[in-house]
Image (cartoon, coloured by chain):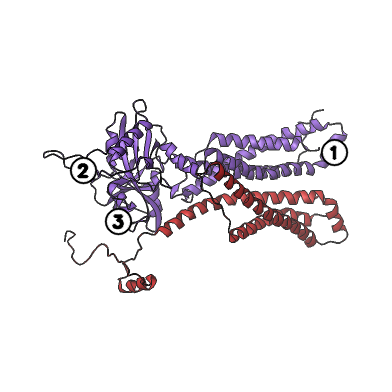
């Protein structure tokens, strides 16, 4: 009456009967409504919590990019050091007929093995360290409520990301070493 | 024997070390600046000054979910030394599918505690029906314009409200990420009755009153509640928000400086400024292994040149000192570059709206302690790696 339009309303509130399949009921309601009318669910606690968690995850993802950059740089250094220290052996291999591909594969395999073992050890130490730290924190400050956990999916993701950044880091020194003639000083 | 003018370190190899230092320094700076930014932003959420005091619910697990009697705002503001009071009902909500916080306020009281500059439209008034002013960040994130109507869905209760954007504001506080609505709107969306609010903030004159004096007054109120004010004929009509006398237990009420109040919530989860700095330093120490290895790799790569110099009569000490003098400027330049890159990356991420925690933008502020720690740790690491090496 006050809005001057008796045919329309701002909102229509629905409450579903108990035991009704909400998805099916909402589908039926949506079919009856005009296209420009939207259905929204009130009290989306799950959605809110999910978004807040996603914000924290975004924050950690940004941070993890820097961590993987360090892993790639460390892998670069490890491969460079390996090539410097094994220059005699690599030159020998090349002299007796080893192909560039073999030298490249050797360096890559070495880096991947180290990265794999290192990341497994790192994850294990990380889990043990975090659990110890949180337990100690709960003992010292009983009001602190921290329960860290790591899902298998997350552990696998970390493992693969570490491996990928290690491979990226070692590709350049491995390629350079494979293309070096045995009389040259690698790198 | 003098070596300073003799360039025997190859630039490409030194650049490798510089790259490692840059990346490690960037990691440390990213960690420290973002974590400390989050800590600072969270603790300054309700005001940094010692003159801002909060009355809050001690039982609540978060600063956004407590409930205290609203009428205490009026009672305490009558005390000598209380300059302003602001009862606030904070409601976590979903607006346009995005998580947001709506803060129910009494605009006149709120502006005495927080300076708000309107960039569009006008400031809210308590009797504005179903209106709200939105922070600049929220307006950008949700693409809200003046006079837009938005459906605000409460999260803690199945209540909702349609609000019209009356203005867009900026403030130098985390309020930029919130929607300000009249107090009753906040109470409705929070699922509280009109007698309760999330917290009450007071601005006090510390020479005249202290938080403990306020607590004493609240304790007195808990044991002997004052009678409700009677409105005699001819007097001013009651305000739009009635002050309902609600009974409460004094054990549930806390009174602290706003800064300490927020810090106490962080402390519950072990998040102190010191613990965050230690965490950043630990991250740096892990990445420092690569700096130590890189320093040694540089020395190993120059073994030929070093052996020639040794055979020419250069002592180990002289060589170590010379290498250190040549590498330190590179290390300092690399760590400065790492810091600058971290600031640039964080600024870009913050600008794109991805650096958020609890739907509030993490403020970025360069902490002198982080800068100093960055340079000290890098210098120490490079120096120790070179001086302890077997040249």
Numbered disc in front, either 2 or 3: 2
Give whichever of discs 2 and 1 has the lower sequence position: 2
Of all residues, the one furthest to the top in this rendering is: B207
Compared with B305, A164 (above or below) is below
Quarter of the image for the C terminus of chain B: give it.
top right
Task: Examine the rendering and report whether any part of residue A182 can be seen.
Answer: no
Q: Position of residue B107 (x, y in %)?
A: 28, 42
- For mark 2, what is the residue? B239
- For mark 3, what is the residue? B161
Mark carried by residue B307: 1
Numbered disc in front, either 1 or 3: 3
Q: How many marks?
A: 3
Using the image, name the chain to which the residue with label 3 belongs: B
Q: Residue at x 36, y 25 (%)?
A: B207
SS at badge 2 = loop
Chain B, chosen colour in render? purple
* Left or right placement of residue B58 versus residue B12 in this view: left
């Amino acid at each position: 009456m006050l809005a001057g339009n008796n045919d329309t309303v701002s909102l229509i509130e629905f409450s579903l009967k108990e035991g009704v399949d909400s998805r099916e009921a909402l589908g039926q309601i949506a079919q009856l409504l005009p296209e420009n009318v939207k259905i929204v669910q009130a009290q989306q606690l799950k959605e809110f919590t999910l978004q807040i968690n996603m914000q924290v995850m975004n924050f950690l993802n940004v941070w993890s990019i820097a961590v993987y950059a360090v892993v790639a740089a460390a892998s670069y250094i490890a491969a460079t050091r390996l090539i410097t220290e094994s220059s005699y052996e690599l030159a020998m291999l090349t002299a007796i007929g080893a192909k560039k591909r073999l030298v490249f594969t050797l360096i890559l395999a070495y880096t991947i093995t180290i990265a794999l073992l290192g990341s497994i050890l790192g994850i294990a130490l990380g889990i043990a360290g975090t659990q110890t730290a949180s337990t100690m924190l709960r003992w010292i400050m009983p009001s602190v409520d921290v329960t860290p956990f790591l899902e298998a999916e997350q552990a696998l993701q970390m493992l693969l990301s570490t491996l990928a950044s290690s491979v990226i880091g070692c590709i350049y020194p491995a390629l350079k070493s494979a293309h070096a003639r045995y009389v040259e000083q690698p790198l | 024997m003098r070596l300073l003018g003799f360039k025997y370190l190859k630039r490409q190899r030194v650049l490798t070390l510089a790259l490692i230092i840059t990346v490690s320094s960037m990691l440390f700076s990213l960690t420290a600046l973002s974590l400390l930014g989050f800590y600072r932003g969270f603790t300054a959420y309700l005001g940094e000054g010692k003159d801002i005091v909060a009355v809050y619910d001690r039982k609540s697990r978060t600063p956004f979910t407590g409930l205290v009697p609203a009428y205490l705002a009026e009672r305490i503001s009558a005390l000598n030394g209380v300059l302003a009071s602001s009862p606030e009902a904070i409601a976590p909500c979903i607006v346009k599918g995005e998580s947001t916080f709506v803060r129910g306020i009494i605009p006149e009281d709120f502006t005495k505690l927080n300076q708000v500059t309107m960039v569009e439209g006008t400031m809210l008034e308590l009797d504005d029906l179903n209106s709200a002013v939105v922070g600049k960040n929220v307006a950008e994130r949700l693409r809200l314009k003046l006079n837009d109507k938005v459906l605000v869905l409460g999260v803690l209760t199945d209540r909702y409200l349609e609000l019209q954007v009356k203005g867009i504001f900026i403030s130098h506080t985390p309020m930029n990420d919130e929607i300000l609505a009249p107090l009753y709107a906040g109470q409705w969306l929070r699922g509280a009755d009109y007698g309760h609010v999330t917290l009450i903030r007071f601005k006090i004159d510390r020479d005249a009153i202290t938080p403990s004096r306020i607590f004493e007054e609240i304790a007195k109120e808990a044991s002997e509640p004052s009678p409700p004010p009677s409105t005699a004929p001819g007097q001013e009509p009651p305000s739009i928000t009635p002050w309902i006398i609600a009974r409460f237990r004094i054990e549930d009420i806390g009174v602290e400086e706003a800064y300490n109040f927020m810090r106490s919530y962080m402390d519950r989860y072990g998040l102190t400024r010191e613990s965050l700095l230690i965490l950043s330093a630990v991250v740096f120490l892990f990445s420092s292994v690569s700096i130590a290895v890189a320093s040694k790799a540089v020395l190993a790569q120059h073994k030929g040149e070093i052996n020639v110099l040794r055979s020419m009569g250069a002592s180990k000490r002289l060589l170590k000192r010379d290498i250190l003098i040549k590498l330190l400027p590179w290390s300092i330049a690399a760590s400065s570059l790492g810091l600058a890159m971290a600031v640039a990356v964080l600024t870009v991420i913050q600008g794109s709206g991805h650096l958020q925690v609890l739907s509030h933008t993490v403020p970025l502020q360069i902490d002198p302690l982080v800068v100093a720690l960055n340079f000290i740790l890098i210098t120490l690491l490079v120096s120790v790696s070179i001086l302890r090496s077997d040249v």
